[in-house]
Image (cartoon, rainbow, N blue to C red):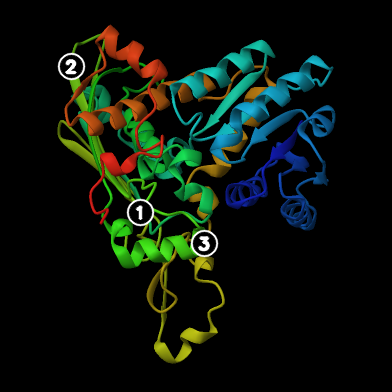
Amino acid sequence: METIKLGIIGAGFVAHFQARAIRQIRNVEIAGITSRTKARAEALARIVRDDGIGAGVVYDSVGEMAPHVDAIAIFSPNFTRIEIMEQIVAAVKQGAALKGAICEKPLGRNVAEARGLVELADEANLRTAYFENQIFMKPVRAQLAQLAPQQKTMGPLVLTRSAEEHGGPHEPWFWDPTRQGGGVLSDMGCHSIAVGWYVLTPPGKAPTFLEPVSVSADCALLKWGLPAWREKLLHNTGVDYGKTPAEDFATGMVTYRNPETGQLVKAQFTDSWMFEKQGLRLFMDGMGPGYAFEVNTLRSTLELFIGDVAAEAIANAEMALEKATASRGLLAVQYNEADLYGYTDENEDAASAFLAGRDGFLSWRYGLEITKLVMAAYLSAERQQTVDLMDPAVQQELESYVPLIQQGRGGEVLLNIT
């Protein structure tokens, strides 16, 4: 089987999770790794080699790695994306024969950055894959296949609700709105908005078939704005939500129009960094005429119970579930999270696409459209009104819009800063 030799930029949490996914597929090998922190790159490389999924050679720079790989995956922090892509373009111009580039969500912190990445990829004539794992989740794909006859006979879904919630990110930069791009709406709202749009799309149509009509959203700082939690955040990450706060809760509604029938459909999204249950929960449900579906990743075929007397034997709560907040009691265990959450399938799709000389199922142009919707949600929350996405003036405004939260001015629009 022909494989893609993948070069990875970044060696943090996402890169490790993606390596777990790649271990389960046959058309990708991790040939190179580079990171701002060489020790992290070397630690990931040891895992790659131990798992037999590639040579995992550690390189000092993107330019040094590019000639030795077929494609590059950008798994580095959001604030590094433009600079990294410029280095990739420079390497291509110097002779690196890259087939494509992958970018982990979000494509950009705002529309200008996302569009910049698309233009840089075009400049280097690179095929692209935007990594939005939830669209590749097997439960999501399975329900679409199972309900295809109902959609054909009764009509497509008309309402979907999507949520991603946990207790907060791992890395300090994720909490900093000026580096990450915002709070939970930027971090996880992009997931929920994307999967809602996808699930509502009639079978056989492109992911951007439905036309976004309007967005209404609300953002709040609830748990992590309280003094005790704000102090804990400052101690653990160095990020001061008393000065540069970000939202830990976001919710909203996107309305779409079917251009063939004129029918309006709606996708609700809810995301939080204040979820106080077992750990990460992805929830999606949808309603159509006479049928429905529901996905909840906290329902597992495996459960464990650990009593107080045995709790001290647990070394790492996250062995059971990403973002786990407890190591005792009744625990939901997802024994293959990388596959459940869609990481395996998005890697396999990108590799197959690049080998065939085409974009992945989700290209960077799709990622740009998701960034627009996220920015429209921030704009709606700031103005406390519905944003009309059909208005040319709004479309133009979004091209240069930077949310106040992203600017470090979240105190002007968020509550619980005392």
Residue 291 in the figure: left or right of residue 345: left
How dense is the environment of label 3, judged by Cα within 10 Å: few (below 14), some, or many (20 and up)?
some
| Badge 2 or badge 1: first in the primary sequence | 1
**Cα–Cα gap, marks 2 and 1:** 45 Å
Residue 260 x %, y %:
25, 8
Q: Are marks 2 and 1 in contact (CB under 8 Å)?
A: no
- The residue to which callout 2 is attached is 263
The amino acid marked with disc number 1 is Gly
Q: Are marks 3 and 2 in contact (CB under 8 Å)?
A: no
The amino acid marked with disc number 2 is Gln
Identify whether 94 is placed above or below 383.
above
**Residue 186 appearing in the image:** yes
Q: Number of marks in the image?
A: 3
| Badge 3 or badge 1: first in the primary sequence | 1
**Cα–Cα gap, marks 3 and 2:** 41 Å
| Badge 3 or badge 2: first in the primary sequence | 2
Disc sitting over residue 335 in the figure: 3
Residue 64 in the figure: left or right of residue 253: right
Residue 254 x %, y %:
25, 28
Residue 374 x %, y %:
36, 30
Residue 246 in the figure: left or right of residue 41: left
Residue 306, quarter of the rendered image: bottom left
Rendered residue at 70%/31% (across/down): 72
Residue 267 x %, y %:
25, 32
Residue 1, quarter of the rendered image: top right
Q: Residue furthest bottom?
A: 309
- The residue to which callout 1 is attached is 242
**Cα–Cα gap, marks 3 and 1:** 38 Å
Between 55 and 109, the one nearer to me in the picture: 109
Between 68 and 348, the one nearer to me in the picture: 68
Mark 1, secondary structure of its residue: loop
Mark 3, secondary structure of its residue: loop
